[in-house]
Amino acid sequence: MKRKICLTMIFALVLMSGIRAQGFYAQQLLLDVEKLGELKQILQDLKEGYQVLQSGYSTIRDVARGSFNLHKAFLDGLLAVSPTVLSYERIAEIADLQVKIVQRYQAAWSRFRQDGNLRPDELALLGQVYDGVIAGCLDDLNDLVLLVTADVLRASDAERMQEIDAIYYRVRAKFSFVDRVSNQTALLSLQRAGEMGDVSILKQLFGLK
């Protein structure tokens, strides 16, 4: 049941990433009231999606702990800060990278579980690695929400944008890490498949020629 819910949330996140093609992430649209509401919903859906993702691991974390438990008052006031901060392109880029991390994780995790070339202990370790990335993304998302929420932090526009930059670089590093781990694990799986004479099957599974 948890896996079904997880997949539903992932599909929703992937669909939301397609909004980019319609110019949703254009800077000028971020100043539109309706678009601000949509961005607020994307951030909230991302948060909930990561919570569902994390609950599917054997090492369940209490993602509702501490300051990450976002209250309705925070969500109602989300993005109610200066236009200078709201129009900062890094906000959309962070959300975009968060979605890509989920997409990359989901595709890789599904393939590694199907190919049968990783031992149970290796799959468990890989799950812990992904779990750590997801937990870090949750923290980054929480920090971003606080920065774009009115009456929460005492900070100038320049300070908020500097912190948003820091979040962006952290999220970008996480995406690169997930991509690197997934690629290295895929190579290991291909190597083992070659030893068993299943290279063609694995190449097809991983979309390689």
Image (tube, helix red, strand yellow):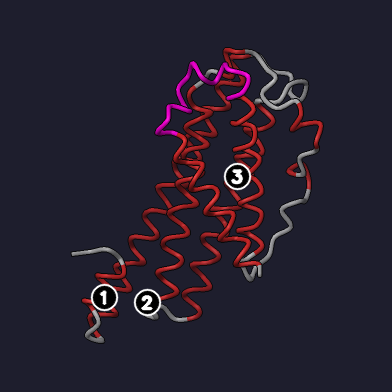
**Disc 3 marks which amino acid?**
Leu
Number of residues whose C-alpha sits closer than 10 Å to that of mark 3, classed few (under 14), some (14–19) or many (20 or more):
many
**Disc 2 marks which amino acid?**
Asp
Q: In this figure, which residue is indicated by the disc labeled 2?
A: 115
Number of residues whose C-alpha sits closer than 10 Å to that of mark 1, classed few (under 14), some (14–19) or many (20 or more):
some
Quadrant of the rendered structure where residue 145 is?
A: top right
Q: Which mark is residue 191?
A: 1
202 vs 15: above or below: below
Tell whether position 114 is magenta: no
> Contact (CB < 8 A) between labels 2 and 3?
no
61 vs 195: above or below: above
Q: Report the mark closest to the observer, 3 or 1.
A: 3
Q: CA distance from mark 3 to mark 1?
A: 35 Å
Residue 119 is situated, as x and y percent measured from the top left of the image, at: 44, 81
Q: CA distance from mark 2 to mark 3?
A: 29 Å
Q: In this figure, which residue is indicated by the disc labeled 3?
A: 46
Q: Which mark is residue 176?
A: none
Residue 1 is situated, as x and y percent measured from the top left of the image, at: 66, 70
Residue in the image at 56% along x and 27% along y: 164
Residue 88 is situated, as x and y percent measured from the top left of the image, at: 52, 20
Query: Element at badge 1?
Result: helix
Query: Element at badge 3?
Result: helix
80 vs 172: above or below: above
Q: CA distance from mark 2 to mark 1?
A: 12 Å
Residue in the image at 22% along x and 85% along y: 197
Which quarter shows the C terminus?
A: bottom left
**Disc 1 marks which amino acid?**
Gln
Residue 107 lies left or right of residue 16; in this view the side is left
Q: Report the mark closest to the observer, 2 or 1.
A: 2
Residue 160 lies left or right of residue 150; in this view the side is left
Residue in the image at 51% along x and 35% along y: 94
Q: Which residues are magenta?
A: 20-35
